[in-house]
Image (spheres, grey):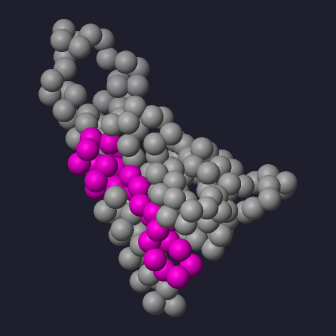
Amino acid sequence: MQKETDDHEYFMRLALTEAKRAYDLGEVPIGAVVVAPDGQVIGRGHNMRESRGDPTAHAEMMAIQRAAAQRHHWRLHGCRLYVTIEPCMMCAGAIQLSRIAHVFYGAVNPKGGALGSSGNAYAFDRLNHYPVVSSGILTPLCGKIVQDFFREKRQRYRARCTDATCGEMSEWSKELASKASSP
């Protein structure tokens, strides 16, 4: 059992490496890797929405596309996906459609997670494929990189913006500012 746990942590650390790449690009730091049944990584991805100007350029989508290209087939039977944050509804759909066997995610996504936090994309009884879903692998590390990213982003915003230079803060920014200042 320890070997299996070590393997899961190893692959999640690879996903965290991808998340760090996103972080360094100024993207929301989420990373993913697709692992073939033989244990070989066949797809890697990190968020690229900002740099590509593409709302679908999520880490999971990038990793799945690369894995399908590597296999020369869209069916990824027997493959596992490791992703640092719980996938959204779009990514859950891509996971299901690509026939990935097992999804492992690190931290929950309470605002948009579709594998249990905000809903369950696989709760429908007429899907033709249901991946196994496991969570909790390196959760503190997976959550921390995202928290650090948004904390730094808020700090940079506050450092350069005042009401006079940037106009009135949006309701979202006000809410973030109040949460950050509360104990």
Residue at position x 44%, y 71% from top?
41
- Image quarter (top left, top right, bottom left or bottom right) of the C terminus: top left
The relative height of residue 44 versus residue 147 in the rendered view (above or below) is below
The relative height of residue 7 versus residue 127 in the rendered view (above or below) is below
The relative height of residue 165 versus residue 143 in the rendered view (above or below) is above
* Residue 44 image point, x, y percent: 41, 61
- Magenta segment includes 18: no
* Residue 76 image point, x, y percent: 61, 65
Q: Residue furthest left?
A: 159
Q: In which quarter of the image is residue 98?
A: bottom right
Q: Which of 56 and 42 is in front in this view?
A: 42
Residue at position x 32%, y 42% from top?
27
Asked whether residue 125 is in view, the answer is: yes
Asked whether residue 83 is in view, the answer is: no
Residue at position x 25%, y 36% from top?
153
Residue at position x 26%, y 10% from top?
167
**Residue 2 vs residue 159: left or right?**
right
Q: Nearer the viewer, residue 94 or 10?
A: 94
- Magenta segment includes 32: yes
- Segment colored magenta: 19-46
**Residue 58 vs residue 114: left or right?**
left
Q: Which residue lies furthest to the front in this view?
A: 72
Q: Nearer the viewer, residue 116 or 79?
A: 79
Q: How many tags in the picture?
A: 0
* Residue 171 image point, x, y percent: 41, 20
